[in-house]
Amino acid sequence: MPRYLVTGGAGFVGSHIVAALCDRGDEVVIFDNLSTGHRAAVPAGVRLIEADLASQQAVDDALADGKWDAVLHFAALSLVGDSMRTPLYYLQANIGNGLRLIDACIRNGVPRFILSSTAALFGMPDRTPIDELARIDPGNPYGESKLVLERALFWADQIHGLRSAVLRYFNAAGSDPDGRLGEDHRPETHLVPLAIDAAMGRRPPLQVFGTDYPTPDGTCIRDYVHVSDLATAHLAALDQLDDRSVTYNLGSANGHSVLDVLRSVERVGGRPVPHTMAPRRPGDPPVLVAASGKITAETGWQPRFAALDDIVATAWRWREAHPHGYC
Ligand code: UDP
């Protein structure tokens, strides 16, 4: 049975990948410090190593504990806005932890590695939708930290033969269609859960960050991709890695403005989303939309949830059933 170590497997994206691996019968061990992940997101029967990637000893112990078919790395600081306030902290944590993990994989003979990367690599893209050949120029330290790890994986492949899949997500949203998992960040900063909570009256009105972008309605455009579609993309990518490394941009190829998202939440929930207009959030590019044709051509992957309302509906159902999140 294939055996995988998943860092950040108790977090939002990581937990959905863990569920997908478990659903197909693979063995999974989660490595997570639970700083943002949730114990309740760890499925019954899955071992949790509650430890920090900053600890060389903890990383070495985990990697030396038996044979691994791959390591999937999700554990990272991931907020663009925070990274603009504390850039050195972001760079040090994400790069330091990622390099420590990659190095330990090489020393312990792990053959395959999956990196959770980001559309934040592309900064202000010169064309859209963004394919894998687009110019890379991170607009914030979070994106920069992922770029360094992408390059480290390039050299780890060239010199040590560690095969990797770099998966650059655009905006992960939604939640497990079977209702087992959801999105619960503390504090929550992401648009979809904030808009849903505002509509449910659980939060103050949503602030729309920036209304003067060069977009049709003046608000930022993003490509929202269902987190369970990201999970199936990880499975597809894992199965590609026997003889080469790959890099894929993952989105649903549809751009939606912030106001489009609010309207979608209103349609799905049948209630208005109270909101106010606010200044731009530093580090936010105006438009990020993925061209995901490469992974589709090479693996057959297709997003199951292409429509924004379908993505929002799964998120709405989970937040309705879990008014206090995972606790
Ligand atoms: N956004 C917003 N108000 C909020 C949170 C987010 O207007 O309270 C906007 C944000 O500026 C961006 C989009 O929604 O244009 C998606 O932001 P999110 O933080 O969900 O994801 P990111 O694009 O930063 O990965």
Image (cartoon, rainbow, N blue to C red):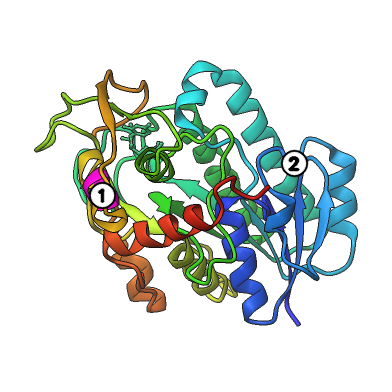
Q: CA distance from mark 1 to mark 2?
A: 44 Å
Q: Main secondary structure of the magenta part?
A: helix
Give the residue at mark 1: 266
User: Which quadrant of the view contains residue 221?
Assistant: top left
Up-down relation of residue 208 to residue 311 (above or below): above
Element at label 1: helix
Q: Is residue 289 visible?
A: no
Q: Residue at x 49, y 52 (%)?
A: 319
- Residue 123: image location, x then y, percent: 33, 33
Q: Quadrant of the N terminus?
A: bottom right
Element at label 2: helix
Chain part drawn in magenta: 261-265
Q: Residue at x 75, y 63 (%)?
A: 110
For marks 1 and 2, give the one nearer the viewer. Answer: 1
- How many labels were placed on the picture? 2
Q: Is residue 1 visible?
A: yes
Q: Is residue 123 left or right of residue 114?
A: left
Is residue 32 rendered magenta in the image? no
Is residue 263 rendered magenta in the image? yes
Q: Residues within 10 Å of mark 1 (few under 14, many from 20)?
A: some
> Is residue 325 or residue 159 the one in the foreground?
325
Q: Residue at x 35, y 23 (%)?
A: 281
- The amino acid sitting under disc 2 is Arg
Q: Is residue 322 left or right of residue 222?
A: right
> Is residue 283 or residue 143 the one in the foreground?
283
Give the residue at mark 2: 100
- Residue 232: image location, x then y, percent: 49, 71
- Quadrant containing ligand 1: top left
